[in-house]
Amino acid sequence: MRAPVTIRPAMPADIAGIDAMMSRAWSAQMQGAYPPSLLILAIPFISRAQPALLASGRYYVAEAEGRILGAGGWSLRGAGGADVRHLAVDAGAAGQGIGRALMAESLSAAGEAGAVEMQATATLNAVGFYERLGFAVTGETQVRLGPALALPCRTMRRALGVRVGPGGLPG
């Protein structure tokens, strides 16, 4: 039997556990979506938790038995917009609803804070996940990781206040 997963606000003390989880997650899940030569350079940049985000109260961890299995959150962008921030689920826990639960928490909290739209900058491997949550691709972008290093991504958006899929997500 699987241990119950709880979602809670992240704390600065979670940084090492989040870093380790993100490294495992993205090293495994981004393969096939990006060339190995890009991943070798990009993974160290993107798999670092952001201390200010952890301290914001808008970033969450999913854990079971004291182990961080996922993390993600949101921030206000202004004019009714919010952004998904640094969402990842441990490769060994993928497909168990953890990413969906983190997004439900983020979508609900952003809506309560007055946001009417959520935007995500999705890695190529994550586009399908966001589409299943009601996001639509609105463009192509690159996340700059250094002067000569960029990660191709997709910009995605969804309106808040709508339910999506079986059981739906709070919007």
Image (cartoon, rainbow, N blue to C red):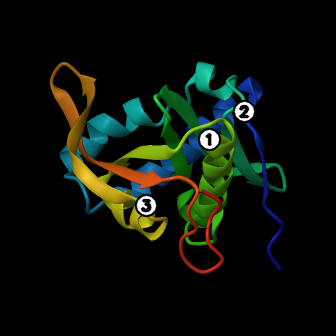
**Distance between the alpha carbons at the discs numbered 3 and 2:** 25 Å
Q: Nearer the viewer, mark 2 or mark 1?
A: 1
**Distance between the alpha carbons at the discs numbered 2 and 1:** 22 Å
Q: Amino acid at mark 2?
A: Asp
Residue denoted by label 1 = 110
Position of the N terminus by quadrant: bottom right
Residue denoted by label 3 = 130
Q: Nearer the viewer, mark 3 or mark 1?
A: 1
- Of label 2 and label 1, which has the lower sequence position? 2
Q: Is residue 155 left or right of residue 104?
A: left
Under circle 3, the secondary element is: helix
Residue 115 percent coordinates (x, y): 56, 39
Q: Residue at x 72, y 29 (%)?
A: 57
Residue denoted by label 2 = 14
Q: Are marks 3 and 1 in contact (CB under 8 Å)?
A: no
Is residue 8 positioned above or below 25 on the image? above
- Of label 3 and label 1, which has the lower sequence position? 1
